[in-house]
Structure formats: structure tokens, C-alpha cells
Amino acid sequence: MADDRNTPGDHRVPTVVVDDVHITYTVNGARTGRGSATSALSRLTSRRRTPGARQVHAVKGVSFAAYKGEAIGLIGSNGSGKSTLLKAVAGLLPPTRGKVHTQGQPSLLGVNAALMGDLTGERNVVLGGLAMGMTREQIRARYDEIVDFSGINEKGDFITLPMRTYSSGMGARLRFSIAAAKSHDVLLIDEALSTGDAKFQRRSKDRIKELRAEAGTVFLVSHSNKSITETCDRALWLEAGTLRMDGPAKEVVKAYEAFTNRK
Amino acid sequence: MTAPSEGAPATAVPTYAPGELAALAARHGLKVSGARPSLPAYVRQLWGRRHFITAFATAKLTAQYSQAKLGQIWQIMTPLLNATVYYFIFGVLMNTKHGVEDFVPFLVTGVFIWTFTSSSITAGTRAISGNIGLVRALHFPRASLPVALALQQLQQLLFSLGALTLILLAFGQYPRPTWLLAVPALALQALFNTGLSMAMARLTAKTPDIAQLTPFVLRTWMYSSGVMWSLDHLLAGDRVPRAVLLVLEYNPAALFINLMRYALIDSYTWDQLPPLAWAAAAGWALLCGVAGFVYFWKAEETYGRG
């Protein structure tokens, strides 16, 4: 599995090619507040760097190619740049240097940001679906499926209540159900497997498997080494923004575990 | 530190020759992710997201008062209370109504139409920065956000117009054919607002500090647009140079406000409008609408960074 990556005359179809990608954030207001209107004006006119601004180099020159049918796990300690890299693959966070080439539109399994706590679950299903680019007809067709999958209505008619009244578990379940309702070419999952109770976790794992079968390539970011080895056949290990290892999931996880235990 | 831990394979990371990956991508026809689409493609994408735009605008509008006991009644109460406050200050205390016929309809029209523009601009300053989570999580043409927020303001204005109709009736202004002119006037204003909102969205996405300055600019603009008083009366005589008067009269906010007054109020006549008022308003709307959209699109791929 590991050796065919460099085989010349490759018959496999690449879906994501990440070519020497660097990502730098500028963080404003790291030290100071925004200051008064007059100081803001002088900063704008002088075009100097703001005093509070800091550069964070989150991803430093990562290169790899992902192929159709692969499930790739991203591991690494907190702040190693996993989520940032995933966002760059999704085209949501443009690389400062280097390029990400993709087949079709990779999508992040993340609809959370589109939902509003003041709206009912019902309306959030529609809003979330539209935000993911589904049509109204597609949402109508899948509506019952989404609500049943989330299990929100198992204990009464909660779907017609505002989402802010949901328990955190219920909210997470509905969010996952909406996000998982659409099938994707390249699917990027960021720590989505740890929501809800045991029953829901099992259900979502099954759904992820289905999504994997439908999608060309799946990327999974997780801190659970177990879910990486269970779901993925290949893993990338990022540490401090650089790619430390790329290979079969079991080997990479083993090396990563040795690294974390040593520290 | 960078040495591989014991047991790890010697070649932990495959190395690629320069250009090898780009060639692989090119061979299989992969596209650069997150690249800016062409302008026509962008317009098509935006049109494809029209249902999201309307749903987002309506959701924002209903979410606004969902925690209040009176709920959606505030949609119409807020503009009415605003008009009352302005009437008390400018009509009673400062007596700017002197010499203005039908002062209450005059004032309320001014306040509502001005609020439409000013709140669209304020909403625009938060379009990207206030929805950064959405921008970083999902793929959609980013112009959907400022457009949706401008649309939300238009929906809000329709509620205000309900209140305005009540006020007009109460002060003896009855529907007549010129009321229909409100439709093109508002359409032009909505286009103008959307363009400005998109421009503000890009500016504040790059320099958040501009959002802090906007209220001051807006207030200056409001006081010089004749929202609470008649510019004609204020600037009568030779006290103010002719050029200043022209600038004030042809500023887009004053044009939109006065066109609405002309449409709705009997005593506001055609000769109170500056010459070519409709052409000027249409010019502003087209200029800002198109320029704002293009300006926003030019930075499409950078939203969400930093």
C-alpha cells in the first residue's frame, strides 16, 4: 500500500494534490485593543503594520497527493496545523504560498456555523441544507431522514423548538445529521465522530462509512488514534506545521504514539 | 528535534521533485482550490445560491426579536418609536419644522429612508467579520453574505413602510398614483445600498478598524442629507456657496430621501427636487451597485484568511 505512492506510470487518479503549501495567519489585536477612532485613522492612513498584529505560520511547506478511494487520517498534537491544512484543502483558507489542486469541490463536514440558535430545528435543517448548496427540493426529500437520523423527536416534538433550547448533545446530533445529509466528492471531517451518546456515535460511524463509499476521498482529523486506525488506511502526521510522516495508518499512528509517550 | 523517532521508516515523508506535483495535477485535470471564479461564473454561482440568500436574510430578521416578549411586533414598533424620538427633538425642541409643510410625514419618510441606507452599510461592515465561522466552514460565493444582509434591511424597510403608511394616513396623506414611484425609487436605493454594503464588507474584512469609524461617517452624512430638515430652507440665501448646495442636493442619500418624499407627500412638489433627480439617482445606483460588486469579487479568494 505504501510503496505504490511513488510508482511511475501511476494508474490511480489523484483527487487532491497539495504542493508545498504554506499558511500564515495575521492575528490583529493580540496585545492591544483596537484603540480609539483617531489612532485607527492614523494607522489606516500610514498603512503601517498594526502594533498588535502578529504573524502565525501555521503550515510550513506541506506536500502530498491523495488518490480516489483513500481515507486519510490527519494526526498531530494540538496546534500542529491539522485543521488549518484541512481548510486549505477545502479552499476555505487560501494558502499564503504553494497550491492546492483538487478534483471537484472538496467540502468540510461543518454546517454548524450556518445554524442559528434562535430558529427552530425545522428551519435550521432548511437553512443548513441551503448553506451547503442543496436545493430546496433536495432538502424536502431528505428532511424526514435528517430528523429521524438525529433522533431529536424521539423524546417529544423538539424539532419545532428553537435550537437554543436543545441540550448540547441534541444540538450536536442535529448538526451532524444536517451535515451528513449531502454526499461529496472529497469529504473533510474534523473531529465529528465524538458527538452524542454511544448509540448516536455508532450511527454516525456507519454514516461516515457510507459517505466514504460515496465520496472519492475522505480526510479525517481526529485526536482519537483508534478512530484513525479504524476508519483510515493512510495517515499524515503533522507536527508544528510540517509533515513528519506519511504512510499506512497503522505505522504512522505507532510512530506518533511512540513520539507522544516519549515526551 | 526533527530526527525521526526510533522504529520509524527511514523515508518518513516522500519527496517530490520541484514541479512534479503540479505536473501530476495538470495531467489529471485538477483545478486550483480556492481560486477566484471569473466574473460571469461568479454571477451564476451567486444566482444559484439565491434560495440560501433569502433564507439567510429571513432567518436573521426573525432571529432578531425572537427572544422579546412582543416578538415580531417590534419590527414595526422600532421604526415608530424612532420617528417619535426624532419628532420630539427636531420638530418640537429644535423647531426645524418651521416652514415645512406636512412636517411629520416629511420627517418620518426621511428617517426611514435614511435608516435603510445607513443600516445596510453598518450591516455590510459586519458581513464577513461577523460570519467568519460560516466563511471558514462552507463553500459559497461570499457576496451572498452582504447581499443577504442588504436584503434583510430591505425586508426591515418593508415593515417600516407599513408604519409609514399608517402615519401618512393619520396625517391626511391618502394614496394617489405618485405613490407608485416609491417602487422604482426603492429599487434604485436597494441597488445602491447593496453595492455599498459589498464595498464595506471587503474593506472591513481587510481592515476591521473601519467598522469603528463608520458610525462617525454615517452621522456626518445623515446631518448633511436633510433627513430631519429641508435642505432648501436651511441653505436658502447666499450664506452657502452654490457648489456646496449642489453637492448636498445630489448626494445619493438626499436624492433617495427626496424622491420618496416627492412620491408620497402631496405638498412636496416636483420643483423642490433638483433637476435630473431620477437620472442622478439611477446613476448612483448603477455606479455603486456594479462597482461595489466587482470590488468585492476581486478579493473573493482572500475572505476568511487571517
Image (tube, rainbow, N blue to C red):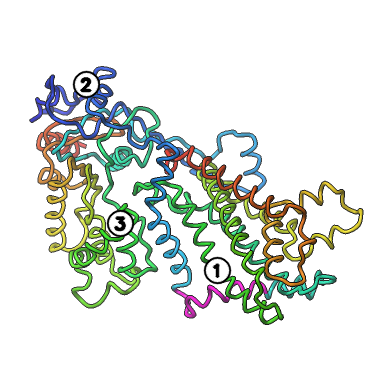
Q: Quadrant of residue A186?
A: top left
Query: Which residue was labeled with disc 2?
Result: B15
Q: Amino acid at mark 2?
A: Thr
Mark 2: few, some, or many residues within 10 Å (few <14, many ≥20)? few
Q: Residue at x 21, y 39 (%)?
A: A74
- Label 2 vs label 3: CA separation? 43 Å
Residue drawn at the location 48% of the way across and 75% of the way down: B72
Q: Residue furthest front?
A: B177
Is residue A31 visible from the viewing direction of this image?
Answer: no
In front: A209, or A126?
A126
Is A217 left, or right, of B247 in this rendering?
left
**x and y, in percent, of residue B39 in the image:** 45, 39
- The range drawn in magenta is B67-83
Which image quadrant for residue A59? top left
Label 1 neighbour load within 10 Å: few <14, some 14-19, many 20+: some
Neighbourhood count class around disc 3 (C-alpha, 10 Å): few under 14, some 14–19, many 20 upward: some
Q: Are marks 3 and 1 on the same chain?
A: no
Between the residue at mark 1 and the residue at mark 2, the CA separation in whole angstroms equals 61 Å
**Residue closest to the far top:** B17
The circle on residue B135 is: none
Chain for mark 3? A
Question: CA separation, marks 3 and 1?
Answer: 27 Å
**Magenta stretch: includes residue B81:** yes
* Residue named by callout 1: B158
The residue indicated by pointer 3 is A135
